Amino acid sequence: MANEQGYNVAVVGATGAVGQKMLETLEKKNFPINNLKLLSSSRSAGKKINFKGEEFIVEEATPESFEGVQIALFSAGGSVSKGLAHEAVTRGAVVVDNTSAFRMDENVPLVVPEVNESDISKHNGIIANPNCSTIQMVAALKPIQDSFGISRVIVSTYQAVSGAGTSAVEELKEQSQAFLNGEELEANLMPVKGDKKHFPIAFNALPQIDVFQDNGYTFEEMKMINETKKIMHAPELHVAATCVRLPFFTSHAESVYVEVDNENVTVEELQKSLANADGVILEDDPSNQVYPTPLNSAGKSEVFVGRVRKDLDNPKGFHLWVVSDNLLKGAAWNSVQIAESLVKNNWL
Ligand code: NAP
Ligand code: 3JN
């Protein structure tokens, strides 16, 4: 139960790229907060962060940090979630976890509220927030699935560097400056921290996001494939993904090919289903060069869809261009929406 002022909320990873957006979103959406705890590693303990005009001191996250916490928003990486999420639940908190630690656990709902909000009610203390690239794609696929049925999805992503955290953003800035100064580029992080090789991201395109799996797909690609089937309750859906990192800061873009069940569906019918969907904005007018771009969608909560067209060979095939702010709908806003749903539906 909330007291009159609201809920006791902890943000784990509060100093990170996602955590910062989490705080901005809680403030912007006026989420009812009684007590707020900002948690990080020992590196940032003691740092001061402003929230709603008040200064908060960041504390190191420990199991005891969660005493009295009702809602804990985690975005400090999978190993932190594996170590601390159950500690938070044991102390009475409901965890909304932004990492891949529990996404495919059958006891953990994996939720995009516009797609499968009611799954939240089945939680056992942890609700998983999907991968950012998955979230924006399923938000666009859901109205198509509901109206026409879908059997196959093939996606190629164009992902912003902020998805790889604050240090990746810094690396892109430094490399861009060095490139324009005619200096040698230093690559220490991308495509994946800790992998064997690093390549410049500035003025480049890297077809690797997260580490390679034995089947030749990257972990990011497998997240998109497996998470899409779970969120859409469609284990039989055929999904393939190619994930690519590009040198811009915010919003992921996706070229999505989707096959519907019926060959008589028109572009106009598909556009109408998208235009009427919760959380989706159709921006699709080629004659006036209207389509979504990463720069235009940055800072916004919705998923933007354009370039809807029929495949020229397969009468059941359609192509879409899907763009959304990876740190908002792809992470912070989706998590806060889940928290709002927990409160609104008494599912805490
Ligand atoms: P980031 O900018 O590097 O920030 C990492 C955050 O985690 C910082 O606040 C850091 O605190 C904290 N942290 C690191 N180690 C910790 C520890 N041992 N205990 C407590 N806190 C610790 O990374 P980010 O981009 O915000 O991403 C963070 C995580 O969110 C990712 O690893 C990923 O799991 C998840 N994420 C999800 C999505 C999505 O698709 N939904 C997108 C991006 C990220 P310090 O300041 O003390 O280092
Ligand atoms: O690279 C992106 O654009 C999204 C990255 C997400 C991410 C980064 C590090 C670890 C994740 C995630 O949420 O899937 C994880 C993880 O928790 O596995």
Image: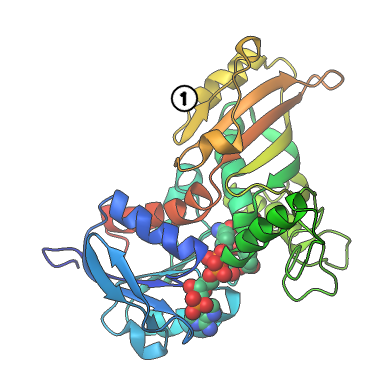
* Element class at badge 1: loop
**Where, by quadrant of the figure, is residue 158 drawn?**
top right
- Give the percent coordinates (x, y) of residue 309: 71, 19
Left or right? Give the position of 292 relative to 198.
Answer: left
Applied colour scheme = rainbow
As displayed, is residue 13 above or below residue 201?
below
Quarter occupied by the N terminus: bottom left
As displayed, is residue 5 above or below residue 228?
below
The answer to which of 283 and 41 lies nearer the viewer is 41
Residue 201 visible? The answer is yes
**Where, by quadrant of the figure, is residue 324 drawn?**
top right
Q: Residue drawn 40% across and 84% down? A: 45
- Give the percent coordinates (x, y) of residue 224: 69, 53
Q: Is mark 1 within 8 Å of ligand 1?
A: no
Mark 1, residues whose alpha carbon is within 10 Å: few (<14), some, or many (≥20)?
few
Q: Which residue is mark 1?
A: 276
Q: Determine the residue located farthest toward the left in the rendered image.
A: 4
Q: Residue drawn 80% across and 73% down? A: 195
The answer to which of 184 and 8 lies nearer the viewer is 184
Residue 131 visible? The answer is no
Residue type beneath disc 1: Asn
* Ligand 1 found in image quarter: bottom right
Q: Residue drawn 72% across and 44% down? A: 157
